[in-house]
Image (tube, grey):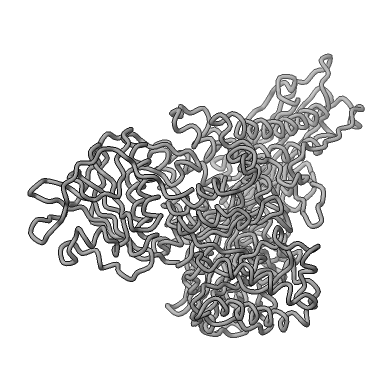
Amino acid sequence: MGIFTVCLLSVKCSAVRFNDTSVSLLQEFTFTKEVAIIYDPKGSALDSIVAHLFSQDLEKITGIKLKVTSDYSTDCDAVFIGNIHSSLFNKLIPHNSIDITSISGKWEQYIIKAVSTPENNRKTLIIAGSDDRGTAFGVFEISRLLGVSPWHWWADVPVNPNDQPVVTNLPIISEGPTVKYRGIFINDEDWGLQPWAAKTFDPGTGDIGTKTYEKVFELLLRLKANLIWPAMHPSTKAFFYYPGNVAMAKEYQIVIGSSHAEPMLRNNVDEWDKSKRGAFNYLTNRKGVQEYWEERIKDSGDLHGIYTLGMRGIHDSGMEGVSEAEAVEVLQSVIDDQRNILGKYHKIVEDVPQAFTAYKEVLDVYDQGLIVPDDVILVWPDDNYGYIKRLANRAEQSRKGGSGVYYHTSYWGRPHDYLWLNTTHPSLIRYEMIKAYERGSRALWVLNVGDIKPHEYSIQLFLDMAYSADAFMESKSTKVHFTGWHHSIFGSIQGQKFSDAMWEYYKLAFERKPEFMGWSQTEPTRPVQNTGYNHMGRGDEAQKRLNAYEVIEHMVSGLKIPENLFPAYYQLIYYPIRAASLINKKFIYRDKAFLASETNKLAALNYKEKSHQAYHDIVEETRYFNQELLDGKWENMMDMAPRKLPVFEDPDIEIDQAENRVGNQFSIRPEVSYGSNQSETLPKYNSWIKSKYFIDIVHSHKDTSGTFYWKASTSHDWIKLSDNKGNLYEDENFHKRIWVDVDWEHIDTAGSFHQGQIIIETPLKSYTVTVLAENRPGLPPDAKHVENDQVVVIYAENYSNISGSNEQHWERVEDFGHSGTVMESGPIKMTSSVSETVEENSPTLSYDFYTFNEADQADVIINALPTHPLTDQYKLRIGISVDNSPIQIIDFKTQGRSEEWKQNVLSNKSSKSISIGKMAPGKHTLKIHMIDPGVLLDFIYIDMGGLNEGGSVLEETMIGKTF
């Protein structure tokens, strides 16, 4: 596409000029139908582009097409758009009349002022940029303020009509962006953006081409971003293959970069022809590789670009033909040669933007002594799952080129892909990126967004932080931003409901992503397994998870959504919640089918059917997204099974159709106590914790000739049942769950131990379930945490005492982690060295807790978020002591892509334990001492022999808690 053609609506001519005495500043500007949008005919192509896009935005609001012209001799109210050095402003505005020079020489800033001329009552809105992108940002800021979302095209967010929209609170003078280069990486596009572009949006090109990139570039400018790493998978032709792509990038002034695997802006997957060029091997084909790079450098001299230095394999792999011992020397030669080639076409190579991304094995090579030129941006990657591998140490922070971050909210690879839904928790994104900002990574931020959709919110958050990080320094800012975004699209009432539901959606996915629900892995691909959720313990945590999803499904379903809002609602709210809920149902019902197959054939078959139905519902919702929504605008964009991995398949559930071995009879299944197998005793009740436990009553199979009545009675009135009789024939699956509670007002002896029974009578047999209740003695008023059935659960934020200083301390990070708030050892900016042991007066968290039973063996299990050491000078150590015992040191640091790391990122949890031997009843104090900065403590278990496995964090055993 070229420059937009000028709108040829009639324009009356009467030269407008402001002078010192005739100008007054206004605090607002009204867009009437007579307003003209004027840009400099001698300005950049981008001025014309944004002028016409702005006119289209206003037409969406007012229904009227405003005139757009480069003729500035008009007597209409007008909007002037241009660079502050534009002739538009030089001719019309004397420099001492309206100051727009305060942003001169700045990077991507803008100034917006409204003025009037009393003699003819003409009003003018001036949008002036320090450079061309600054101008574009100013124009799109006005669009945003008037209600045009950056996502109005990409997520079909509607615009509220207004005959005369008004922009207020003028003037506006922007700050410079926090991060110089800010953008996205389109990656793993094979199952979304590429087939959609090729088959739906631009079938003429049959690929992600110029038409698609134009929409991408517009989105970036509306989000105040400036950088793209183009799509580069085998399914897509290289960005430079289509000349229009490069021309479009120049017009939109988007900076073109490339990924860690694409040095010198070359897409090796598409552009390196082995049959003609030979091996992509720097040792055996050095001249061929150099010529390949030089071709691109020679052709891209006038492009806004950032050249990636270094070398990996053709795609996402290590260098070909290079041993580990040779890697540093070879890569050093590569970088030196790349710089020499750049020097042939640029007088000062240090002024050419360049980046070196220390991704995967390249980070190891860098740490072994590779020298990266001081002017090059050093880009730190995350571990592909949202945790940054490391950041700049004190010496690296002083580099001229600075540093940046390459971050993922979408990934293909081990231990498992997550290419379907957008589920990276906003608080994790904020924490890691603000951590990077505080440690000086401000030169470049790029986000791997997969297909762009469905990553709309993550992109918005990431780029808003990149533009203005200071607004996100407080951890609570994440939720404020999250809520505000939903309000801006859906209004305050529905927006709040959707925000609450989506926050829970991210919380559930933080515990386990939808793509990880098969408990399978890739590289190599492995079959699905039973989930890690406990069905017969922890209050049936598997069912709790299903219930949590059903709650948020209910919150966003059955609502009266305005027709114009429905497409945005479906894409941004309904589909992700519904799809995530369904894949959880698919696997948890699969579990239940297998578990029930021995004792309740009818239930097993019913659960099998529910699991299959969940799969087919995903198919149907995805079909609707692609084919019916907006008459197929997004057809081929949403793939419910990227790479066709086992986790996405219709589950294979084999249930033996023969008669159950237990025969035609009832069975009783009490909830399992922590650490025990199935028994006829419920977990122990504790007067300090208001807990309930369940008993399942089931019949082996449907038999209409049989009798299915049951009744239950108790030996004591303090045992309370949710139901005391019933007919299983009337219950789904011939299954009834009754809940058992204790009425403590009927147990009047403090410090006593009580035992009772529940007798369940059926036509075939009577069953007895034992109930144990401990009415514990009084505790001090400040007591918080107590043992419950041989386990103490403490959330890290609920400490008894805390110590520290400005130099080193523990700090709360809100709305984060499995427990809801984590404790961070800091400060993150810390550059001083640390001791190998716990120093005297080190920052300490103290936790008092009370136990009631003697334990021969007790363990303390510390659960942290699986972050990585801040820099190469730190680890992730803390010291632990109980009751002033000798301090034991643990380190959460993991090695490479070890099995420990894999389990950590699949669960967003890192667990370390220490043994403390025997533990007597009474008060105890756990102390956690800081050693390294960057540890994020989440929750703590004191296991006295009662801890059993599960997939979620246990409820905190805090006095007065109900669960």
How far from the left and from the top, in percent, is residue 139? Answer: 34, 52
Q: In which quarter of the image is the C terminus?
A: top right
How far from the left and from the top, in percent, is residue 204? Answer: 61, 40
Q: Does 306 sit left or right of 946 as displayed?
A: left
Residue 957 shows in the view = no
How far from the left and from the top, in percent, is residue 304? Answer: 49, 65
Residue 917 shows in the view = yes
From the viewer's perspective, is residue 173 above or below residue 519? below
Q: Does 221 sit left or right of 328 as displayed?
A: left
Q: Which quadrant of the structure image shows residue 62?
A: top left
Nearer to the camera, 104 or 614: 104
Nearer to the camera, 606 or 456: 456
Q: Which quadrant of the structure image shows residue 477?
A: bottom left
User: Going 30% across and 50% down the picture, which residue do you hit?
Assistant: 70
How far from the left and from the top, in percent, is residue 618? Answer: 67, 34
User: Going 79% across and 69% down the picture, which residue do you hit?
Assistant: 279
From the viewer's perspective, is residue 567 above or below residue 515? above
